[in-house]
């Protein structure tokens, strides 16, 4: 098979690594890719939002399956463009990717189909939002930009003054662009956060192993929200009881709800869950693999990823038995100091050779590129250092040891990824 992967981050590197293990594949392309993905794939200089160019490339190269890693192209309708050209593609169509593309849509869907989530109201008028906050809201409260905002369009407000400033930021100053045209005001939930990724073929769902992400930039969950500073899998808080509850009230119900709405979902549904005192509730849906969740989940998957993805495309997922190794994985993100605000790029990175032939250790590239024959930094999140272990504690120890194998001048990381493990 010839496979094309669309995207350029750590998630796409993990997907490329996974695809490269499949005996079915003989050629991988990645558009636009990065310096790490280049080890497995031929990187092609086409942007992820250039749908027509990507489809033309897939036809020209006779690509058998295109895998879309990122949210923007999925929400923008890349799958529809490929399908119109008769190309096989893994991911939801535009009318299904709205599950991630609009927070207001997903909240309304959960309300309509009785899927447990936080109480909320949607607003497209800032004055009405302010009136609601002044008269009815209980604090703390959560404000969410409706559209895609790189995982950053969520504000937790402790009091009315913060909430008023938040409305201004999202709806008037448009800090997150058009993502803030509509805003969701949501009750603040407390509990453990857990992510569960799943494969879906329109009617059947197969969940993967659980994971937990760390969003804040600094140790102790301080600092600004980022795209994710590290993650671990499985979550010790995702118990059999939680799994049973979610299977009964969340997972299949979401797939059935989308089908009932005439928006059958094929691809990956990422369930962001909050384990509250009243039971698990959905925080958010994503329509693709998480980043960096993919970096801890895929190395633990025993199945051939292409077999599973093809089963999703063909509506035959019920024939697949997903299997995961009985172990654990931890990923620590090496970022550029100053992320997510301001940071330098183009700094040489050394130490990749330390990962050669080391079983259970991975260096997934997120923001890297080639410059004058060497690999340099090219983003806020630079690398995802992942390691496996028999237990979470062992995996965590291995991952932090491996972070020392890599050097670049403005290397920054959190030192408490997976710390919750010690409390479990």
Image: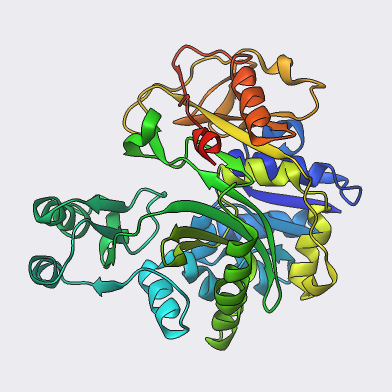
On the picture, is 284 further left or further right than 262? left
User: For the point 41% across and 50% down, which residue is it?
Assistant: 151
On the picture, is 261 further left or further right than 243? left
Which image quarter is the N terminus in? Answer: bottom right
Q: Is residue 154 visible?
A: yes
- With respect to residue 39, does 402 lie above or below? above
Q: Position of residue 160 (x, y in %)?
A: 10, 56
Q: Position of residue 2 (x, y in %)?
A: 82, 52
User: For the point 27% across and 60% down, which residue is it?
Assistant: 180
Which image quarter is the C terminus in? Answer: top right
Q: Nearer the viewer, residue 6 or 164?
A: 164
* Rendering quarter of residue 185: bottom left
Render colour scheme: rainbow
Q: Nearer the viewer, residue 82 or 343?
A: 343
Q: Nearer the viewer, residue 302 or 98?
A: 302
Q: Position of residue 20 (x, y in %)?
A: 81, 42
Count the marks: how many? 0
* Rendering quarter of residue 128: bottom left
- With respect to residue 353, does 260 lie above or below? below
On the picture, is 314 further left or further right than 229? right
User: For the point 77% across and 50% down, which residue is it?
Assistant: 324
Q: Position of residue 44 (x, y in %)?
A: 66, 41
- With respect to residue 108, does 217 lie above or below? above
Q: Is residue 46 visible?
A: no
* Rendering quarter of residue 199: bottom right
């Amino acid at each position: 098979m010839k496979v094309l992967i669309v995207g350029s981050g750590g998630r796409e590197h993990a997907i490329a690594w996974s695809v490269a293990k499949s005996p079915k594949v003989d050629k991988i392309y990645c558009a636009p890719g990065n310096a790490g993905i280049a080890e497995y794939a031929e990187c092609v200089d086409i942007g992820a939002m250039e749908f027509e160019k990507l489809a033309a490339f897939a036809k020209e190269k006779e690509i058998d399956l295109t895998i879309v890693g990122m949210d923007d192209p999925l929400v923008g309708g890349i799958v529809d463009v490929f399908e119109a050209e008769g190309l096989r593609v893994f991911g939801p169509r535009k009318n299904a990717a709205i599950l991630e593309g609009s927070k207001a849509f997903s909240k309304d869907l959960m309300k309509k189909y009785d899927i447990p989530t936080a109480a909320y109201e949607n607003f497209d008028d800032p004055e009405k939002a302010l009136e609601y906050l002044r008269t009815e809201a209980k604090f703390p409260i959560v404000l969410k930009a409706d559209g895609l905002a790189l995982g950053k369009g969520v504000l937790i407000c402790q009091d009315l003054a913060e909430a008023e400033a938040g409305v201004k930021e999202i709806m008037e100053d448009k800090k997150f662009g058009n993502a803030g045209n509509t805003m969701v005001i949501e009750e603040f939930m407390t509990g453990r956060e857990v992510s569960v990724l799943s494969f879906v073929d329109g009617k059947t769902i197969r969940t993967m192993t659980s994971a937990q992400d760390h969003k804040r930039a600094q140790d102790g969950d301080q600092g600004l929200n980022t795209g994710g500073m590290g993650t671990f899998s499985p979550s010790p808080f995702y118990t059999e009881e939680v799994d049973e509850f979610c299977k009964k009230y969340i997972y299949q119900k979401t797939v059935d709800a989308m089908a009932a709405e005439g928006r059958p979902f094929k691809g990956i549904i990422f369930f962001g869950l909050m384990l509250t005192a009243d039971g698990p509730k959905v925080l958010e849906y994503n329509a693709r693999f998480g980043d960096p969740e993919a970096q801890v989940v895929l190395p633990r998957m025993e199945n051939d990823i292409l077999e599973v993805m093809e089963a999703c495309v063909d509506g035959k997922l019920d024939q697949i038995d997903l299997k995961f190794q009985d172990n654990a994985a931890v990923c620590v993100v090496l970022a550029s100091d100053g992320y997510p605000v301001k940071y330098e790029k183009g700094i040489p990175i050394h130490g990749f050779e330390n990962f050669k032939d080391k079983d259970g250790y991975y260096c997934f590239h997120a923001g890297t590129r080639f410059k004058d024959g060497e690999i340099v930094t090219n983003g806020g999140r630079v690398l995802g250092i992942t390691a496996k272990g028999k237990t979470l504690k062992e995996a965590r120890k291995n991952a932090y040891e491996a972070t020392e194998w890599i050097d670049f001048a403005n290397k920054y990381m959190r030192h408490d990824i997976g710390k919750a493990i010690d409390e479990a």
